[in-house]
Image (tube, rainbow, N blue to C red):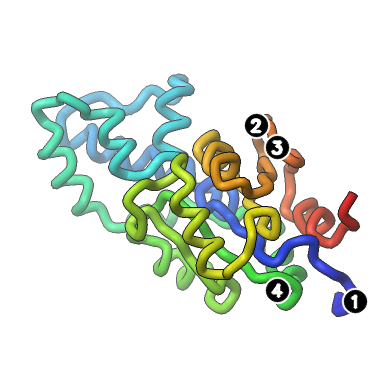
Amino acid sequence: MSELKSRYKVVIYDCDGVILDSIESNYVFYNRVMGFLGRPEIDRDNGDAKRVLHTHSFNDVMEYFFSGDPQREDALRFAKTIHYRDLMPYMRLEDGFVNALDQLKGHTSLAICTNRASSMDMIIEDFELTGYFEYVMTASQVTHPKPHPEPLLKVLDYFEVKPDEALFIGDGEVDMQAAQSAGVPFISYKSHLPALARIQHHSEIVRHVFSAKP
């Protein structure tokens, strides 16, 4: 692929729902918190709760479930005792992801911008993604996580690129809103969000990145 030219200087990936199929692990995590408090599990038919626990930062999810709750601090303390590796069996890489990285690497810089806070280093190690990403931006590195543009803007600053020289791939409203506010072209993965393109497989990202600009 040495003759191919990337449309973008940087391709930025969200993690949950894009790199990882991790929705089950998120339910397991927050249901353990609910169980510790003696509460019923989260209703899986509640679309709003699913959207929040799958796309928002840990602090925002806890605020969603426990704002004004007298057990909020107990929930926070217990949640911080749950280890990422207890949840790993409930995660898997999205189909075609590594193959796409292999095709893109060397033609464009690769980065991650996620609302995860403390588990990305372990995810990269455990899923054998070491060496692919030049920069990983997490919620722990910013004052305002997505949907605020701060995380994406910091990625742009790191690579010293303009917004239209980057591409962000996400699956949630927080991703779309962050991209819009930062001025970064956005591709919607396995969702119907307004975007430059809506795709269902990582091979489609490769085709887009190496396609001629209109």
Q: Is residue 121 positioned above or below 70 on the image?
A: below
The percent coordinates of residue 11 (x first, y second) are: 66, 61
Q: Is residue 206 positioned above or below 50 on the image?
A: below
The percent coordinates of residue 72 (x first, y second) are: 15, 33
The percent coordinates of residue 33 (x first, y second) are: 23, 38
What number is the disc on residue 3? 1
What number is the disc on residue 105? 4
What residue appears at the point 69 percent right and 45 percent down from the top-left corner? 187
Picture quadrant of residue 89: bottom left
What number is the disc on residue 195? 3
The amino acid beneath tag 1 is: Glu
Sequence-earlier tag: 4 or 3: 4
Query: Dot 4, how many residues are within 10 Å of its Cα: few (below 14), some (14-19), or many (20+)?
Result: some
The amino acid beneath tag 3 is: Ala
Q: Are marks 2 and 1 in contact (CB under 8 Å)?
A: no
Q: Are marks 4 and 2 in contact (CB under 8 Å)?
A: no
